[in-house]
Image: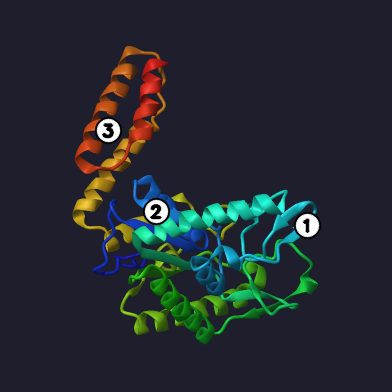
Amino acid sequence: MNFRTEVDAIKSDLRIDHSKGIFLSGSCFAENIGKQLLQRKFNALINPLGISYNPISIQGLINAEVDDFKDFQKKEDIWFHYQLHSQFGEASEYTLKEKISQALKIQNKQLEETTTIIISYGTANVHELISSNEIVNNCHKQAASLFRKRTLSQEEIVASFQKNKIKLEEKYGKEFQFILTVSPVRHLREGFRENLISKSILHLAVNQIIKENSNCIYFPSYEIMMDDLRDYRFYNDDLLHPNEFAVNYIWKKFETSFCSETIKQINNKIEVFNQSINHRAFQPKSNKHSSFLKNLKKQLIDFQATSQIDFSEEIIALENKISNP
């Protein structure tokens, strides 16, 4: 007897490995998948310009240039920009501009080196500045009277994606592969029905995008969370965000979809290494633990030599533990 409906991993010709760069942008679900990739030593860059939730802002930030950031705002001695997350708040306008410039350099370098972009859409609900009709990425807790709220249309989202895709390919002189997903994290501040309408529009837009673009594929993180893991025990205490078990479960579906058997074996080996590295000894000064650390160090050095996956930081940390138990 089956007591749940399992969402199978998708079939895809797109493959990721540790030698290729991966760029992730969008909602906090992009952060979750990105962290899974980083833990397994993939060359991944996650939201260098901060988390973003609506498609217009996400797609705009991927194509952002320094000159796009003007009209800086100041509130309670903190400078910010409406197109950036609050993590980009600084005490001086100059420092904020420098921080944006450095983030863009990192972003451009990654996009030059990769052909795989993962985008996680969070919501179709947006806030527009009344003064300019500009869709903002973050309201920064400014007065509600400065904004109007509305819901993006399917056509707006698709048009924005196509425009930014062309711009991106012209800028870097190559075709990118896009993995698109709709975040399963619900935005309930707008209301339950409003969240459902928002997610529905995102699904319709993504469906049209992948039909019109052969280099776009959909990963069903939303369906895995809402239909496969259909229980609040898979959520954090806020009952909105997936917990660690759920994130790991969705990651395994992602891995099966986009990693070859060889890469999955490498991932498993790295996971074992991570467990050993994070192991807390009851007797850290014992000879037994010292031998464990030396053996682990040798294994990492050997694995690094054969796989070309960088473990230099971990090796240095182990050397310090061995020298200073």
Q: Earlier in the sequence, mark 1 or mark 2?
A: 2
Give the camera-side residue of 290 and 68. Answer: 68
Q: Quadrant of residue 81?
A: bottom right
Query: Identity of the amino acid at label 2?
Result: Ala
Res. 300 mark: 3
Q: What's the CA distance linking mark 3 and mark 2? A: 21 Å
Q: Residue at x 31, y 16 (%)?
A: 288
The image shows residue 63 at horizontal and vertical percentages of 49, 68
Number of residues whose C-alpha sits closer than 10 Å to that of mark 3, classed few (under 14), some (14–19) or many (20 or more): many
Q: What's the CA distance linking mark 1 and mark 2? A: 33 Å
Q: Residue at x 41, y 20 (%)?
A: 282
Query: Identity of the amino acid at label 3?
Result: Leu
* Mark 3 and mark 1 residues within 8 Å of each other at the beta carbon: no
Q: Which residue is mark 1?
A: 75
Q: Residue at x 26, y 69 (%)?
A: 12
Q: Which residue is mark 2?
A: 44
For residue 184, side relative to residue 85 (left or right): left
